[in-house]
Image (tube, coloured by chain):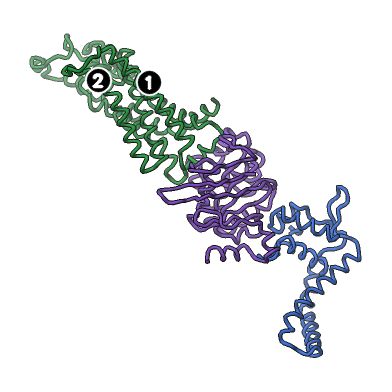
Amino acid sequence: MKTNEGWTEVAFNGRDPVYLQVVKFFKEQLVIGKMEAGQIIPSRRELGALLKINPNTAQKAYKEMEEQQLIVTEGNSPSRITMDENVLRAIRAELIGEAVEAFVASVRKIDVPVEELLELVKHKYTEDKQLNGGKQGGGAQHD
Amino acid sequence: MKFYLKLVHMEVHRFRYLLGGLMVLTLLMQFGVVLLWSLSERSIRTGPGWSEKLITYHPFSETGKLTFNEMMFNNQFWFSFPVLISIAVIAGYVFLIWYRDWLGRDTFIYRLLMLPSNRGCIYAAKLTAILLFTFGLVSFQLLLLPLEMMLFNLAIPEALRDPSYLSQAILQNQVLKVLIPGQLDAFVMAYAIGILTVLAAFTVILLERSYRVIGIGFAVIYVFVCGAALLAPITLQRPGNTASYLYPGETYSIMLALTVIIVFVSVWLSIRLLNRKITV
Amino acid sequence: MIEVRDIHKKYRRRKVLDGVSFQIEKGEITCLIGTNGAGKSTIMKAIMGLTPFRKGEIIIDGQKLGKERYEKISFIPDHLTMPPAMKLDEAMVFMADFYRSWNEDRAKELMGFFQLEGKERIGNLSKGTAAKFNLLLGLALDTEYVLMDEPFSGIDMFSRALITEVFSSHLIEDRGVLITTHEIADVEHLIDQAVLLKNGSVIRNFNCELLRMEESKSIVDVMKEVYQA
């Protein structure tokens, strides 16, 4: 059952292609460290069952990840997350970039001076991290 | 062939309790009638005052002794009752064997029609099931009669009875006389009419199942046409009919030919409906 | 590929199907969507030869098939269609007797997966259990296509989750699947193709991932456009 952890709670939205949501999910898992470079990933059938999606969609997601060099398949061995540091760094940058872009787009409407905004972000971000950090630490020990 | 036999087996499996029930009913009622009548007759004849009564008594047999024939003759209703019930059940089952698969919670007809076999097999299996049901009961009755005669012989002391022949005994009962006639041609005739009726009923059912309300209209027309076709030669043959130009032998041949045609048309139409027009 | 070509059907002067055409591709899940009485079940019955139609044709892998279609397509109606007096084991023997495509191992696997008891009588099954057994009878046939009519109707939450799991499993992998449902939420992320019916004809027919990609719309968005307009 341990392999199911973290997989089952994926909630897909209806408006973005499911396979792209799967790719995004993999990237997020990688960035927060729930998945590691070089780790073996589930087969398309297993992934379909884990995420309750159509095996075709799982296949499409893997194809997309292969094209983005996020996963690699060598010969007959199962697919793995890439070890390529450059790709991993790029993914991190991509996710941060996307998040910041979305944030900026929504905050721009309010027209806040950039200094005030940065101060607020800094305050809020560290406060949240302290709160959540305690909990996460506990969870890790429990494992 | 394999499909057909499996389907027949399934149909028999489905009516086994009904058939068994009717057999038990027939056995219990007929044995009861034989036993009660025999014992009461015996007590009358061995009781006091029998010799005086004998004067006004019209003996059934020449010797004045009891016979199995007399038992059969005197118990028309109760002896035939289970047989009549069986006939009614078979008549109902001709319809039930189809409608059961459409009506009710399970609608088994979906599965039957989706079997990878010719749908003619379903038709043939249901027809066979009705025939097996009927002949099962008839042969059971034939098996019961000698047993009932034995029971009669056990109940009546030898001094009080004369022997009977089974073939004679059957003729004493108005219902059995028709169901188990002594002559082969009468037997064939009786069951040919029976089978023809079942085939026509199947066609009626399938017409209704294919076209529903409108199908009932088609069915009425179909039955009317079949009936008229069969009766036409007889009407022509009527003694008072001056237009009659057929000899009895000719009438018989025409009826036989018409029967064969009706059988073919019924079967052909039924299977065609099953293949092309039936709806679940 | 199953091609439904221009099917017309009337029932008492009402046009139930008025020129329905679409295709069911192998290896894909196609979903028929429509309001009650839109003709979803009728289309499935027409494909299976369970109801006649006035005009049009059904082509299965390039051929018009008769009884051969029943080894090629398995139909799971919205209710169990086995006599209530039968035991589950007997029903499976019945299937094994008649179908070459019956897969005994798969049937056993599914009996375990759904936790069904072979000695039970069909008439005694609860609604959810009957639905599971119904699914088993259809899925244990090794057919190239599977048609399922309302696999989620009237089923409790846990059975529903179990049945959803079937859709993302090897049980339907590589098969062509056609389902109908009025609760799209259960299958929204599972289906490849959606066919929307209105007034007896196909009003929209699209690939779901393409729709999301090109129009950023969900299936429900399109349903609202079609049925509330």
Q: Residue at x 84, y 68 (%)?
A: A91
In the image, the chain rendered in blue is: A
Q: Residue at x 81, y 90 (%)?
A: A115
In the image, the chain rendered in purple is: C
In the image, the chain rendered in green is: B
Q: Nearer the viewer, residue A112 or B155?
A: A112
Count residues near mark 1 (Cα–Cα under 10 Å), then give few for <14, some for 14-19, many for 20+: few
Asked which secondary structure carries label 1, the reply is helix
Q: Is residue C12 left or right of residue C72?
A: left
Q: Could you say which quadrant of the image residue A92 lies in?
A: bottom right
Numbered badge on residue B260: 1
Give the CA distance from mark 2 to mark 1: 17 Å
Residue farthest to the top, as pictured: B63
Task: Give residue C168's position: percent from left, percent from top.
Answer: 68, 53
Query: In which quadrant will I find the N terminus of chain C?
Result: top right
**Chain identifier of the residue bearing label 1 in the image:** B
Against C205, is B121 above or below?
Answer: above
Count residues near mark 2 (Cα–Cα under 10 Å), then give few for <14, some for 14-19, many for 20+: some
Task: Give residue C206's position: percent from left, percent from top.
Answer: 64, 57
Residue C120 shows up from this direction: no
Task: Give residue C155's position: percent from left, percent from top.
Answer: 54, 56
Q: Which residue is mark 2?
A: B234
Against C142, is C31 above or below?
Answer: below
Residue B186 shows up from this direction: yes
